[in-house]
Image: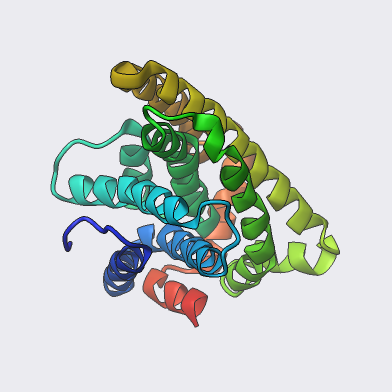
């Protein structure tokens, strides 16, 4: 992996490196990384279009947020320590699971843990609420690409294909609500990290423990029916992970 990114373009380059590696090695980590790269590209376009109150600050924020994922990825693959949330997600990539499970595990770690950390640290010594309008504006930008992402996922996952045909946009609405709810929780975490200041690692450890509990339910659902449904979905998607990721990108 290259040096720590300082611009969104450098973030996109490193995400591409991870995706390329995932395609070569059939690594399901590439599923989440592709989705995350697409959302990062959307944020870059919004910054270029001047859609934020403070576009320069938004790039710094987005890069800091991305670096938490890139650092976790590098540490895990180097055998070093990373958060329990990311360790569970990366461990799960060694197992045969549905694409959506891998995406959700990545989103769980990155939004429910990393996003609040990035926001709280960014605004250390400043008024965190000055970031709120731009933080929430991202919700609208993500909503704009939800249908595109769903269409791409539907190329691989029969479940999404059926939902897309029958949902009449209600599925997009539900995805939007889910994302907004997760980001609202991240804003709560941001306040906790910001308020703790130099002692914020205790907050991070506590939040990480809570996020792991949710990840465990995604990774190992509590009911037999849910476990069976995930297994069936994984079989329909096939084992050619690299080819599936390329279909997402095409």
Q: Which quadrant holds residue 23? A: bottom left
Give the camera-side residue of 228 and 77: 77
Residue 174, compared with residue 212, is above or below; it is below
Does residue 155 appear in this view? yes
Give the camera-side residue of 235 and 187: 187
Which percent across, then down, holds residue 233? Answer: 58, 58
Give the camera-side residue of 210 and 3: 3
Residue 100, compared with residue 131, is above or below; it is below
Which percent across, then down, holds residue 166? Answer: 83, 64
Residue 137, compared with residue 161, is above or below; it is above
Residue at the spot x=35%, y=47% of the render? 64
Does residue 97 appear in this view? no
Q: Is residue 79 left or right of residue 103?
A: left
Give the camera-side residue of 3 and 104: 3
Q: Quarter holding the N terminus?
A: bottom left
Residue at the spot x=58%, y=47% of the render? 134
Give the color scheme: rainbow, by chain, secondary structure or one colour: rainbow
Q: Is residue 185 left or right of residue 172?
A: left
Q: Which quadrant holds residue 91? A: top left
Residue at the spot x=69%, y=51% of the render? 175
Q: Residue furthest bottom?
A: 250
Q: Which quadrant holds residue 170? A: bottom right
């Amino acid at each position: 992996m290259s040096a720590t990114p300082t611009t969104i373009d450098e973030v996109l380059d490193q995400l591409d490196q991870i995706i390329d590696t995932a395609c070569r090695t059939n690594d399901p980590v590439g599923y989440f990384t592709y989705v995350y790269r697409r959302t990062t590209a959307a944020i870059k376009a919004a910054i270029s279009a001047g859609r934020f109150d403070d576009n320069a600050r938004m790039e710094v924020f987005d890069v800091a947020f991305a670096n938490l994922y890139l650092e976790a990825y590098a540490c895990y693959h180097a055998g070093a320590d990373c958060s329990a949330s990311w360790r569970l997600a990366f461990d799960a990539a060694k197992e045969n699971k549905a694409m959506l499970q891998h995406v959700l595990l990545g989103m769980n770690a990155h939004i429910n843990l990393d996003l609040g950390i990035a926001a709280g640290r960014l605004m250390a010594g400043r008024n965190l609420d000055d970031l709120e309008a731009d933080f929430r504006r991202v919700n609208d930008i993500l909503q704009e690409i939800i249908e595109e992402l769903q269409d791409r996922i539907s190329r691989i996952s029969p479940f999404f294909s059926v939902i897309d045909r029958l949902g009449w946009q209600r599925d997009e609405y539900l995805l939007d609500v889910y994302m907004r709810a997760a980001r609202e929780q991240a804003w709560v975490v941001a306040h906790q990290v910001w308020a703790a200041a130099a002692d914020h690692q205790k907050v991070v450890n506590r939040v990480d423990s809570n996020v792991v509990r949710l990840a465990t339910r995604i990774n190992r659902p509590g009911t037999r029916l849910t476990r069976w449904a995930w297994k069936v979905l994984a079989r329909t998607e096939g084992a050619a992970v690299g080819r599936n990721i390329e279909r997402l990108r095409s």
